[in-house]
Amino acid sequence: MSNVANEFSLLEETLLIEKPEKTEPLGILFWICVGWIGVNVLAAILANVLPMKNPLFEDYNAINVGPGLHHLFGTDDLGRDIFSRVVFGSRVSIAVGVGAMVIGFGVGAPLGMLAAYKRGRFDTVLTTFMYVLLAFPAIIATIAVLSFWTPRALLKIIVVIGLASVPLVYRVIRTATLNVATKDYIIAAKVQGATDRRILIKELLPNIAPIGVSFLLIGIATVITLEGALAFLGLSVNPPTPSWGNMINEARTVLAQNPWLVIFPSLALCLFLLCLNFIGDRLRTHFDVTEVKL
Amino acid sequence: MLRYVTRRLVMLLGIVFVISVGSFYLIHLLPGDPAVVILGTGATPANKAALFKQLGLDKPIYLQYFTWIGNVIRGNMGTSFISQSSVAATIRAALPIDLEIIVLSQLLAFVAAIPMAMRSARKPDGPLDRVLGASSFTLLSVPPFIIIVLLVLFVSIKLGIPHTGPSSYVTFASDPIGNLESLALPAFTLAIGSFVVYYRVLRSDLIATLQEEFITMARSKGISQRRIMWRHAFRPSSVALLGAASVNIGGLLASGFVVQYLLAIPGLGYTLISAINTSDFLLVQGIVLTVSVGVVLINFIFDFVINIVDPRISRE
């Protein structure tokens, strides 16, 4: 009888171990944000096939029209449809945000992981170098390079911002990896004779991925803000290609006549950034909780 | 302490060297013959000879660097062939405006962030903390170029407050009050961005500090809440605040550029964008160099101040 009870309690214990402790739910706001980002990305991808007005078509019979049925968000000072310009404008922001982070993570993350795993001289040299680069104000460097490296094109902007983000990504990923690399299970894997490659990919990568993803989202938001500022200063893609930043830039000259022209792209940009930041922040706290429990 | 400062000083010199090489090399990013691009419409043989002498363009590239850096150290960043004025003089005229905007904005940000962070930290997750937390998080997603456009729309266009709109900058020498009015919106815009960061950093650091044993000790001695906050908790937590302010400087300058561009305030940012648009590359190069070195120097000074506030850091 007591044996059964013992077995039962043992079973219960294993069950307790197997069943992950209930983490705090991500919340409805989180999923609304995910949905909003999804809608934006879909609209940006499908902008060409969606039944929308041409964002470059200038309708001189409808100049500075307010929001209405015919033009959902109204028209600008050249009679172009603001709604379709906002949708098409999201393409530049999303392309720069994702593209630059692909470069930043593509270069910075492997280096950061390797440095934290290998340590030694490789780590010291690389980290010192990255810290020197980090001291360089990235925004000013970006403006400087883009103003000299003419003519400006979307790809150049992505490359410049992407490279500028490498030191930051390196630092975050290196710190995250350092925290994991000293854990017992990594040492256990080493003792078992696992190759470096296996440890890096199978053991380290999955454990730093959550931190990486939340930083990736916040990074995309930061890059989009930077591109917006560059576009506002007229240093991003050339008009008439719409982007959220250059729409706001063009709107500043007709601010008094047509405030809608600045309000809609601003709203689109801020909502997009807010959702990205919120998802990133939520994921970070969410995974921090599980990390403490490990 | 002395060893720490020396080590940082060596690092500083290294960084300044890297910045100078980067700024120097910018000219060579230009497509085609730099001399032709820099001179633009003013490409007369005499000008070309002057530029070659100024930049040493006929020498190998490392000698060009030494020619250039030698001139820069002596305070000569060249003469712009577009505006025919000295680059260094143009920068000296514009720089005070940036500094004024930044100092004003930082005063506003600190005055707002410190008391609010203290209030929040006193009751974490209380109603005030939640409201401030949510609103500061939202503001984090509003870029400065949107804040300033909206401020101009409501304050200077709808309310019609003088000196706040575009192209209405008043110099300090001619009218100090008007000068403050014309810099009010820029300072406020930069202050919002800084406030959000300072508030969030100081709040979370204060919450951690308030759980330390020396705070419990102070409480048990019956020291007032106010005194504990200012005398016992603020000093250790101010290190985080200073660190945030130091990191913030580069972003502040960039936000300043955006604001000046919109309002046509003749600071470094407006000068820089105009120089880019008129292809005045020597001026762009001079501003990039000045601003980057300035940011690095300010960071160095902040490091020093942080060490004075918390001497434990240099002993590590």
Image (cartoon, grey):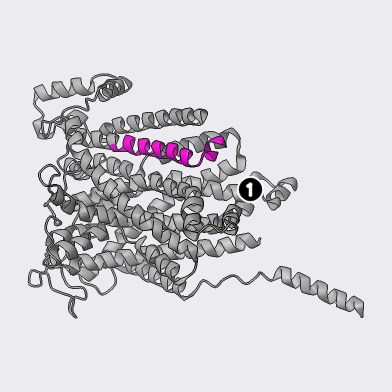
Give percent across and percent down for residue A251.
17, 61
Question: Is A144 contained in the magenta span?
Answer: no
At which x and y percent is residue A4? 88, 78
Q: Mark 1 points at which residue?
A: A181
User: Disc count in the image?
Assistant: 1
Label 1 neighbour load within 10 Å: few <14, some 14-19, many 20+: many
In the current view of this chain or complex, which residue is farthest to the front? B222
Does B310 lie within the magenta span? yes
Q: Is residue A52 visible?
A: yes
Between residue B197 and residue B31, name the one nearer to us.
B197
Going 18% across and 51% down the picture, which residue do you hit?
A: B180
Q: Is mark 1 on a helix, strand or loop?
A: helix
A246 horizontally vs A33: left or right: left
Residue B110 on image: x %, y %: 36, 53
Q: In which quarter of the image is the N terminus of chain A?
A: bottom right
Q: Is the magenta stretch mostly helix, strand or loop?
A: helix
Chain containing mark 1: A
Give the left or right position of residue B207, taking residue A223 as reference: right
**Foreground pick, B97 / A177:** B97
**Which residue is painted at 13% across and 61% down in the image?**
B161
Please state if A1 lies on the left or on the right of B213 as rendered: right
Observer-nearest of B56 and A14: A14
Q: What stretch is highlighted in magenta?
A: B291-316
Q: Which residue is drawn at 37% across and 48% down?
A: B248
* Amino acid on which disc 1 is placed: Ala
- Residue B76's place in the image compared with B250, above or below, is above
